[in-house]
Image: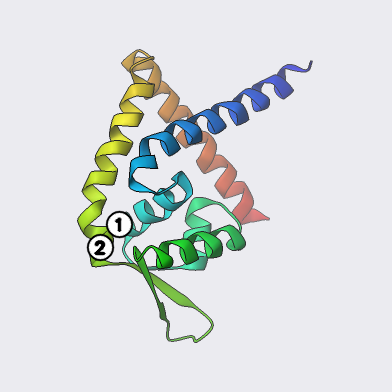
Amino acid sequence: MNTTHELFHSIQQLARQFTKHLNTALEPFDIYSSEWAILFVLKKNGPLTQKEIAEYLSIEAPPVTRTVKKLVEKKYVLQVKGEDKRTNKVFLTDVALQKYEEWEVAVLQANQELLAQLPVDSWVYLQQTISQWSQSLASKEEKN
């Protein structure tokens, strides 16, 4: 097998393993990693449109729409019509803000469990490499 195929296959497998690990950590709270990603982005950046959420997470709009709908049903986010009636701003609810710290503790603990398997200098290097690669891909996409 071509080594580039192996590299990208390994990255995809690792991403799925991370998602599974995070879903297990969030299971007691009845939320999934896809929902956590949106909750995290809203907590970090404040209210955003669904388009802004999709751009930040580098995913297509339909999965964001479905996930936001689930979060609305769980009463964790509100959708408010923007000045442009075609857009919705998504806000965290008071319920989500009250539960956020509990969710974050579970996520951080899950992350620590994964990082404990690597020496600190390795994960620092890994973070730098991933950031550089991500920025490079983002700037390439902007040019297209």
In the image, 131: left or right of 15? left
Q: Please give the label number shown on residue 95.
A: 2
Name the element at disc 1. Answer: helix
Residue for point 57% across, 48% down? 139
| Nearer-the-camera pick, 47 or 21 | 21
Quarter where residue 122 is shown: top left
Q: How many marks?
A: 2
**Left or right of 72 in this view: 51:** right
Residue 137 locus on image (x, y percent): 59, 43
Q: Is residue 39 above or below residue 16?
A: below
Determine which of the numbered discs, if any, sits on residue 63 in the image: none
Percent of width and height locating residue 78: 37, 72
Spatial separation of the CA atoms under disc 1 and disc 2: 13 Å
Q: How is the image coloured?
A: rainbow
Seen at 36% across and 66% down, the residue is 77
Query: Measured from the top left, where is residue 5 in percent x and y?
Result: 73, 24
Q: Amino acid at mark 2?
A: Val
Quadrant for the N terminus, please: top right
Numbered disc 2: secondary structure:
helix
Considering only vertical position in the picture, is 26 above or below 9? below
Viewer-nearest of discs 1 and 2: 2
> Looking at the image, which is closer to me, 95 or 50?
95
Residue 76: quarter of image: bottom left
Foreground pick, 127 / 48: 48
Check disc 1 and report the residue beneath it. 43
Precedes in sequence: disc 1 or disc 2: 1
Residue type at the position of mark 1: Lys
